[in-house]
């Protein structure tokens, strides 16, 4: 009888040991995936399934606005600072739709929505994955996202600006409906609203709203877009700012049924040791993702104007992601010589970025499988 019991016992002990081991994150099984939108399109579901497994091959590299402009150029649709440096487009493309809620023709950074749409479609046609952030207007004051006047309670159901907020979501829905490939199919998008809420920098952040209000806002947003408006090409990504515990990560968690993917936004700042703490945070996020059977990405990072660190890519970022099943890492935009995060030809970290891109654990546009099948 022991010959049957012993192997089972060993298996049981081993699996108990692994369950909460943040130092040994393993990929979650891809069975029993759930979707925040029960009616998500097949391609959107396939994208989530592929995001679950891609981390075992490597981490996809992403860049915000990569083809819209670069550190020293603007308006050349096939160009990207990433491609100019390493010869390949990123695998993930980030875009921003703040001010769409006001029906403006340009977002808060002066980028036209028509251009954003066409760049997003081109990225998809190249096989890339698109993600969208929404730095929305403060609904109480009309100020920007950084106007921290409390506002969340006014737009959730029962709030005095709730109807206005529905109108904002109508505009978001119209934009999402307009994202179609050349065959007319809807393009799946990783939607990442109300990010970095563990900090108090935005009107939806901690200190400016309660966890209960944040959760109500998130759930209403998902439900209104998917059920009321019938938007079915979105995966919803939850992305706190730097965190130090599971409790902090989950303080504003909207519920497993309302989130498709876990994220983390953590920039390299002088206030902490990025390589060390970044790795700790990624491991923490991966252990939560594993328990929730969802993929995880490093949704925003970078060292602003990285001229101070010529080896940032291999000695900092690579040390955080290498060997970890993180689906993607996204570097923020190269907006100008005074506000850039990615490399560009001639920058101090150009050679180091090539080494980073050559590392087998980083995946660029040329390295990824079809993410929609
Ligand atoms: C921030 C900065 C801002 C910008 C915002 C939304 O991190 O790049 O200049 O307005 O993202 O794109």
Image (tube, rainbow, N blue to C red):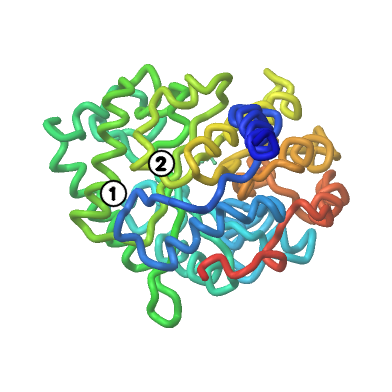
Mark 1 Cα-neighbour bin, 10 Å: few <14, some 14–19, many ≥20:
many
Residue 302, located in which quarter of the rendered image?
A: top right
Query: Is residue 90 in sight in this rendering?
Result: yes
The residue at 60%/62% (across/down) is 67
Residue 311 appears left or right of 302:
right
Q: Is residue 31 above or below residue 208?
A: below
- Residue for badge 2: 135
The residue at 44%/51% (across/down) is 33
- Residue for badge 1: 101
Mark 2 Cα-neighbour bin, 10 Å: few <14, some 14–19, many ≥20:
many
Tell me where residue 234 appears, x and y as whole percent: 38, 56
Tell me where residue 320 appears, x and y as whole percent: 73, 36
Query: Would you say the beta carbon of the disc 2 residue lies within 8 angstroms of ligand 1?
Result: yes
Question: What is the secondary structure assignment of the residue under circle 2?
Answer: loop
The residue at 20%/34% (across/down) is 155
Q: Earlier in the sequence, mark 1 or mark 2?
A: 1
The one nearer the camera, 207 or 232, is 232
Residue 318 appears left or right of 107:
right
Tell me where residue 16 appears, x and y as whole percent: 61, 28
Q: Answer whether labels 1 and 2 touch (C-beta < 8 Å).
A: no
The one nearer the camera, 167 or 230, is 230
Tell me where residue 149 appears, x and y as whole percent: 31, 23
Residue 6 appears left or right of 177:
right
Question: What is the secondary structure assignment of the residue under circle 1?
Answer: helix
Question: Image quadrant for the N terminus?
Answer: top right
Query: Is residue 282 in sight in this rendering?
Result: no
Q: Is residue 18 above or below residue 69?
A: above
């Amino acid at each position: 009888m022991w010959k049957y019991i012993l192997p089972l016992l060993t298996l049981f002990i081993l699996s108990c040991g692994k369950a909460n081991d943040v130092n040994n994150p393993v990929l979650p099984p891809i069975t029993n995936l759930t979707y925040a939108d029960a009616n998500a399109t097949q391609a959107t579901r396939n994208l989530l399934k592929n995001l679950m497994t891609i981390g075992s091959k490597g981490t996809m590299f992403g860049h915000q606005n990569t083809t819209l402009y670069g550190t020293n150029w603007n308006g050349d649709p096939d160009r990207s600072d990433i491609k100019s440096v390493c010869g390949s487009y990123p695998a993930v493309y980030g875009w921003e739709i703040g001010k769409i809620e006001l029906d403006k023709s340009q977002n808060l950074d002066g980028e036209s929505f028509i251009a954003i749409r066409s760049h997003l479609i081109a990225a998809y046609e190249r096989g890339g994955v698109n993600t969208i952030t929404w730095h929305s207007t403060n609904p109480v004051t009309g100020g920007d996202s950084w106007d921290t006047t409390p506002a969340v309670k006014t737009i959730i159901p029962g709030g005095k600006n709730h109807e206005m907020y529905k109108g904002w979501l109508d505009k978001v829905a119209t934009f999402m409906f307009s994202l179609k490939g050349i065959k007319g199919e809807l393009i799946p998008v990783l939607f990442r609203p109300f990010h970095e809420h563990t900090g108090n920098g935005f009107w939806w952040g901690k200190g400016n709203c309660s966890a209960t209000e944040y959760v109500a806002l998130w759930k209403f947003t998902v439900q209104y877009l998917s059920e009321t408006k019938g938007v079915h090409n979105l995966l919803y990504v939850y992305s706190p700012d730097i965190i130090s515990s599971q409790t902090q990560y989950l303080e504003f968690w909207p519920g497993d049924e309302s989130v498709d993917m876990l994220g983390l936004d953590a920039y390299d700042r002088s206030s902490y040791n990025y390589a060390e703490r970044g790795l700790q945070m990624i491991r923490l996020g991966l252990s939560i993702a594993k328990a929730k059977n969802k993929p995880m990405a490093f949704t925003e990072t970078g060292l602003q104007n990285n001229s101070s660190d010529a080896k940032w890519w291999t000695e900092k970022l690579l040390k955080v992601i290498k060997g970890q099943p993180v689906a993607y890492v996204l570097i923020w935009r190269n907006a100008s010589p005074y506000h850039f995060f990615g490399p560009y030809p001639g920058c101090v970290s150009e050679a180091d970025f090539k080494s980073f891109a050559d590392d087998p654990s980083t995946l660029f546009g040329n390295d990824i499988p079809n993410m929609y099948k």
